[in-house]
Amino acid sequence: MELKLAIGSDHAGFRLKEAVKKHLNRRGIEYKDFGTYSEESCDYPDIARDVAIAVKNGEFDFGILICGTGIGISIAANKVKGIRAALCHDTFSAKAARAHNNANILAMGARVIGEGLACEIVDSFLSAQFEGGRHQRRVDKIHEIENMQD
Ligand SMILES: O=C(CO)[C@H](O)[C@H](O)COP(=O)(O)O
């Protein structure tokens, strides 16, 4: 799989990010780590912004964002036009996020799930394909809402 990912977390997600990076290394999947690089307290919107803009600009196929709950970092990423960040804590949702919502960022909460499940969620997200059709119409409507804000 020739994928290039952007990955980032805040301090709460740092350890899980390291575990996900190890998993990606084992699978031979290329990624760029946008930080944070320690467990020192930082602000998740800063990381969400950098990853989301890089994905939106087409430098990466997908993004992975991790904070304590996954909530704040996904909310922040979704403020970037063209970003569809999906907070997933199960493999079914991760697959549907790609198949139905054409999500381009996977968000997870390190204080919610463990490393094993997180890596399975990453695999489900990356292996699923957008189904298009009626789902494309709905994704288009999401972006119509986005464009109403101009
Ligand atoms: O989950 C999060 C945002 O949704 C953050 O990781 C969490 O709020 C950080 O909390 P603290 O500064 O107390 O470690």
Image (cartoon, rainbow, N blue to C red):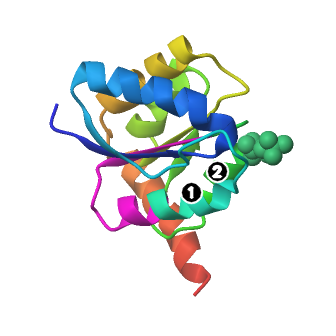
**Marker count (numbered):** 2
Q: Measure the alpha-carbon separation of dots 2 and 1.
A: 6 Å
State which region is magenta.
52-66
Which residue carries the number 1 mark?
A: 48
Q: Is residue 64 magenta?
A: yes
State the residue at coordinates (45%, 27%). 20
Quadrant occupied by the N terminus: top left
- Percent position of residue 148, x then y: 58, 81
Classify mark 1: helix, strand or loop.
Answer: helix
Which residue carries the number 2 mark?
A: 73
Quadrant occupied by the C terminus: bottom right
State the residue at coordinates (25%, 21%). 27
- Percent position of residue 50, x then y: 48, 63
Label 2 or label 1, whichever comes before in sequence order: 1
Q: How packed is label 1: few (under 14 Cα within 10 Å), some, or many (20 or more)?
A: many
State the residue at coordinates (62%, 50%). 74
User: Is residue 19 depicted above or below 71 in this figure?
Assistant: above
User: Is disc 2's CB within 8 Å of ligand 1?
Assistant: yes
Q: Nearer the viewer, residue 125 or 111?
A: 111
* Cβ atoms at labels 2 and 1 below 8 Å apart: yes
